[in-house]
Image (tube, helix red, strand yellow):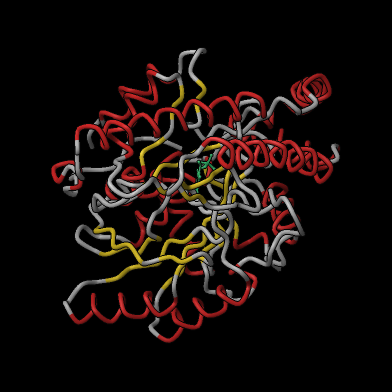
Amino acid sequence: MTVSAVRALFSVANRPEVVSLAGGMPNIADLPLAELGESFNQLVRGNGIQAMQYGSGQGELFMREKICEVMAEEAIAANPDDVVITCGSQQALDLVTRIFVDPGDVVLCEAPSYVGAMGTFNSYQARIHHVAMDEHGLVPQALAQAIVALRAAGQKVKFLYTIPNFNNPTGITQPLERRRELLAVAREYGLLVVEDNPYGLLTIEGDPLAAMRSMDDEVIYLGSFSKTFAPGFRVGWVLAPHAVRERLVIAQEAAVLSPPVFSQFAIANYLENFDWRGQIDTFRSMYAARRDAMLDGLASFMPPGTTWTTPNGGFFVWVTLPEGLDSQALLPRAVTERVAFVPGTAFYADGFGSRNMRLSYCFPTPERIVEGCRRLGKAITDELDMHATFGLGTDVARHRPVSGPAPNVT
Ligand code: PMP
C-alpha cells in the first residue's frame, strides 16, 4: 500500500480558496438536523441499553427488513435473511474480496472504475483487468473476450465488479438492455457479478432503474446509506445468495464482531419515522442544480477539443482533455488557479486515463462550480498555449503506466 503524490496535492486543494471538484463527499446540509437530534435523543433514552450493546454479526433483523424495503425501489425482491450489514459498502467490498480472491486472481472492472474498490482488490493482491466501456457502460463483447482470453492464459477470473448507475468516475449508466446483455454473458461463462450501487436512487430525470440483482438472483449486490442518508453512520450492506451470505457473516464476525449497532438503530428509526423518500427527492433536486451548473460551466469555459459525459445522477462528470494534454501534469497549474480535480489515472490500475479527469459536482454551491469550471478552463487553455508555444508534444514518460495502487479518493 502506497501514498500517492496526488494525495499530497489534496492537502493544498482542500484550502477554502480552492474550488474542489475533486472530493466525492455527499452534500448532507439539507438533512433535518434538529428533528434527527431529537430522535437520537429519544433513541438513547428509550432504547440506549440495546442500541449501545454489541449486536448480531449479520446485522440487526429490523435493519435488514428496512433495507429490503429500500431495495424494492430498484425492483429487488429480497429476503432479509440474505442481507449482511457492513460498515459502509466499502467494507462490503472488502468482505466479498476476502472470501473470493486469492493472491494473483483476476477481478474484472470497468475501464475506468472506483478507486476505493481497486484499492481493496489490490490489498488482496488481485490482478485488476479493465473491460472497455462505451456511452452505455461495459461492452458485453469486450467482457466475453476478456473472460475467454484470461482463462485461455490460465488466469482465475473471480468476478466482475460493476457500478451500473452513475459510475464513479464517469457518471455513465447502463440502460436496462445493457444490463441484461451483460448478465447473459456472465451466465454463459459462469462469471460472478458484483453490483455496486450506492448512487442508484439519486437519479436526476426519471425513476431509478431496475438493479441487475432484480434480473438475476446470483448477483451479489452492494448497497449503502452513505449517499441517500449520511455516510457518517457507516452502514452499507451486501445482498448475496445463501451460501455466499453464510461466508460473509463469518468474515464479518472475524472483522468487526458486529457492525455498528447504534447506527443501525438510528437509521432504522429514520426510515420508520421520517419521509426518507421525500429526503431523497430533496437531494435529487439539489444535485440536479449542481450537475446543471457544471454542464453549463463546462460548455462556457472548456476550450475546443475537450469533451465530457452527461450524467443523469450520482456525483461525477468525466472529462477528456484535448489531444496531447496530461491531467496529472495539469493538476499543479489548476491548483495554482485555485481549482482541483482528480486525474484520470487514479481510476485505472494500468496507467491509462492520462487525458481524463474526474470532476465532482456534489459538494460546492452551483456558483462555485461554475467558477471552478472557469478556473479549470483557464488552466487547460494556458496549458494548451504552452504546448503551442514551446512545441511540447505528449510527454512519453507521463504516459508510462504507473505501478502501485491508485490514490485514496472516494
Ligand atoms: N462504491 C462506490 C462506487 C463509491 O463511490 C463509494 C464511495 N465513494 C463506495 C462504494 C463506498 O461508500 P460507503 O463505504 O460510504 O458506503
Task: Pinpoint residue 258: horizontal percent, then vertical percent.
Answer: 52, 40
Image vertical order of residue 218 relative to residue 365, above or below? below
User: Is 79 placed left or right of 341 in the picture?
Assistant: right
Image quadrant where residue 336 sits: top left
Image vertical order of residue 59 relative to residue 140, above or below? above
Image vertical order of residue 55 relative to residue 19, above or below? below
Residue at 63% x, 65% y is 211
Residue at the bottom extreme of this rendering: 188
Q: Quadrant of the N terminus?
A: top left
Task: Pinpoint residue 34: horizontal percent, then vertical percent.
Answer: 81, 19
Residue at 24% x, 49% y is 351
Residue at the left extreme of this rendering: 397
Residue at 63% x, 27% y is 52
- Foreground residue, 273 or 298? 298
Residue at 55% x, 32% y is 25
User: Is 128 placed left or right of 138 in the picture?
Assistant: left
